[in-house]
Image (cartoon, coloured by chain):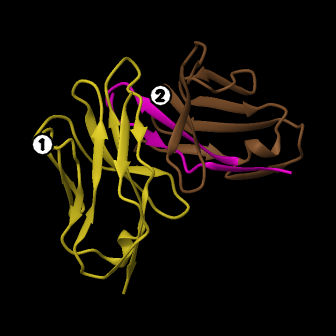
Chain colours: A yellow, B brown
Amino acid sequence: GDSVTQMEGPVTLSEEAFLTINCTYTATGYPSLFWYVQYPGEGLQLLLKATKADDKGSNKGFEATYRKETTSFHLEKGSVQVSDSAVYFCALNSGGSNYKLTFGKGTLLTVNP
Amino acid sequence: GAVVSQHPSWVICKSGTSVKIECRSLDFQATTMFWYRQFPKQSLMLMATSNEGSKATYEQGVEKDKFLINHASLTLSTLTVTSAHPEDSSFYICSARRGLTKNIQYFGAGTRLSVL
């Protein structure tokens, strides 16, 4: 079945540091890939997505590239801010009539001033 | 746009009682709603998928008689935890998918259930 593995947290960085959160997946066919972010006390929000190989999703300075050869979708940001502190979830969707999502365990990011 | 409201955000109940959690799409019609359960430091586990006007589809290992899901309208789905026990204590999250953005789900803020 489908599965998503993302790096264990928590991750603690200083402001303006470079961020990478690794995500690899196992899926049948050609899944769509997502990063969701959950700020404290809020629901999950879609951060970015990619629907086919070599696509790059980007939003709010975050980027991730769909790498089919390595089955990866690593999240990166060049310069993090305190406001980026949140839990980040990698997820995939293999299609089907209901477009179910399979999530990784989430990575807690804390950015210190 | 695409706001999903979940209520209550936190509920405490006695063992043996039933608890209802509501999930509403505030500014769109949700063709499909999903219910997840999240344990501490664990991934979101999909419990069931519901389409408006039809019976929910439960994931393997989820007791449908214990977790009753109703999706009576395009903007409201409810999850009722029947005869709750301490092991049902968890964080429950709903999401909704609207027809035009098929592979994007919009999430509620979650409900923390504590069964004493």
Residue at horizontal 74 percent and vertical 41 percent from the top: B88
Quadrant of residue B97 within the rendered picture: top left
Amino acid type at image mark 2:
Ala
Q: Nearer the viewer, mark 1 or mark 2?
A: 1
Chain at numbered mark 2: B
Q: Looking at this view, is A42 or A68 the one in front?
A: A68
Q: Is residue B114 found inside the magenta-colored segment of the image?
A: yes
Q: Looking at the image, which residue is at 59% across and 55% down?
A: B40
Residue B57, x across and y down, in percent: 56, 18
Write down the chain letter for disc 1: A
Say which residue label 1 marks: A55
Q: CA distance from mark 1 to mark 2?
A: 28 Å
Left or right placement of residue B56 versus residue B101 in this view: right
Is any part of residue A90 visible from this angle? no
B60 magenta-colored: no
Note whether A21 is above or below A54 in the view shown. below
Residue A110, given in percent of the width and then of the height, sits at: 41, 74
The residue tagged 2 is: B30
Q: Are marks 1 and 2 in contact (CB under 8 Å)?
A: no
